[in-house]
Amino acid sequence: MILASLLAVVVVAVVVARPWQDVPPPLRAPSPSQPQSLRSVSVDFGIVTDPATDWAALDAHLDEVGATGVDLNAGRVEFTAFDWAAYPDAAAEPGADHIARAARALRLTGDGRQREIGLIVDAYVPEWIVQDPSIAGRSADGTPATYTASAAQLARGPVGDRLVEYVAALGERYEPSQIAITELFLDINSFGDDDLALFREMTGATDWPRTADGLPDDYADSVAAWRADVLAGLLARMRSALDAVDGGRGAGIVLAMDARVDFDDPAKGSPVSGQLYDVLLRSADRLVLWGYLFGQRPPTDISRVTAGLEEAGYDMSRFTVSVGMWAPFSVDPPGVLSADVLAQAVEQAATNGVTHVNVTPASLLTDEDWAALAAVWNPASS
C-alpha cells in the first residue's frame, strides 16, 4: 500500500511537471540531410511564449504549405524565451522553456522529415535603456534612442558582450540550424560622445564629417563604412562564440543577420543603417533581406532586388528573402498584405538564384494566406 502510494505521487509529479516538454529536441538535420532550398515561416515571440498557442494547428499549416523550415523568435537579452542561467531575471516565464516546447511540436514534417528550426535574436534593449540611459544611442542633438544601444556599446560595451553571450547560449542549448540577429543597425542614433571617440579610434578622423550647417553628416561614406565595420565586428564575435560551442559543433550553426533593402539600388545595401552587404558578409554566413512591400510596392520590386544583387556578382546562396506581411498602407485587407500579393511576393523572392525564402510573421497569416502560400510552395496539396 505504501509502495502504491509512493508510485502514485511520482506519477502525478511527472505528469504535472512534464519535464520532457522542456528538453530541447534536435533543431536541425544532419549536414548531408539539410535541404539545398528552404521555405520557412517566422513565429513571433508573443506566439512562442503564449501558453495558449495551438502548436498542432501551426504544425498542420506548415505541412499544408510544405514549409521545410521555421524560425522561432527567442526574444531579447532582457526578455528571453527560456531560463537563461546567466540572467534568470530575463525569463519571460521562469521555469518554462518555450523554445523547446515549440520545437518539439514543429520539428517534424507530416512525412517524418526534420524541419530546419532557426532562432531569432532581437537586438533591441528598451528596458535596459530605461534602467541605464547611458547605453542608449544618441542623435546629433543628444536625444537618446528608445530601443537601440550606441555603436560604442555594441563594439566595446556590455550590450555587445551580452548579445554575444546570448547567441552562444542559444547555440549551446539548442544547436539550431540558424541564429538570425534582427533589429541590428546603426542610424541617426550613433552620434553620442562615446560613438565619436570610437569613430576617431577606428577611422583616424578627428571629427564627424559635417554638412554645410555644421551637423554630423548621416549620409557620409565614411560614417556608413564605420557603422558597417562596427556591426561586422560584433557579428565576428558572435561567429567565434558559436564556433567554440560544444567542442566545435557550433561551427555548423548558420549566423544570419536581418538587413534592410534599397529597392532602387539593391547592391549597395542600406548604408545609412550601417548595412553594407559586402562588409557584413565577411562575418555573417547569410543575410535575411527584408523584402517588405508594406502595401506600397508591387511584388515585382522584389525580383528587381534579386536581379540587382545577382548582377552585382553576389553569391545568391547567402541571401534569404523574407516577405513581410505588414502593410500599413493597405486598406483591403487593413494593415496586411492580401493573400494574392503574398503569393506573388514569394514567387518573386525565389528568383535570380535565391533558394531560401521566408514569410513573417506567422501571427498575421490567415487561413486564406496559408492556402495562397500552399498554392506556390506546395501545389500538390492545394
Image (spheres, rainbow, N blue to C red):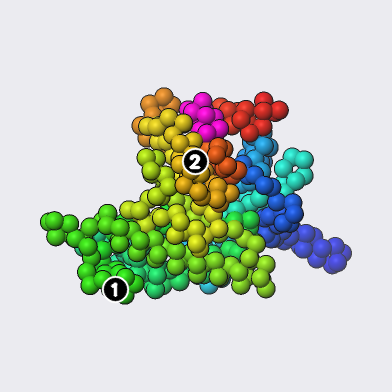
Instruction: Spot the residue most to the left.
Output: 213
Local SS, label 2: helix
Q: Which amino acid lies under the numbered mark 1 shown in the image of this protein?
A: Gly
Identified at 49% across, 28% down, the residue is: 341
Q: Position of residue 241 (x, y in %)?
A: 56, 70
**Residue with the mark numbered 1:** 204
Q: Amino acid at mark 2?
A: Thr
Q: Is residue 114 above or below residue 378?
A: below
Circle number at residue 313: none
Residue 351, x across and y down, in percent: 55, 37
Q: Tell me the crowding category of disc 2: few under 14, some 14 to 19, or many 20 or more residues within 10 angstroms, Cα based.
A: many
Whichever of labels 1 and 2 marks the residue nearer the N terminus, that label is 1
Query: In the rendered view, would you say 186 is above or below 156?
Result: above
Which span of residues is magenta-colored? Answer: 336-348
Query: Circle 1 sits in a helix, a strand or a loop, which is it?
Result: loop
Q: Residue 146's spot in the image, x, y percent?
A: 31, 57
> What main secondary structure does the magenta stretch of the protein show?
helix
Residues under numbered marks 1 and 2 in contact, where contact means CB atoms less than 8 Å apart: no
Left or right of 330: which side holds 2? right
Is residue 364 in view from this perspective? no
55 displayed left or right of 289: right
Residue 221, image quadrant:
bottom left
Residue at horizontal 60 percent and vertical 69 percent from the top: 243
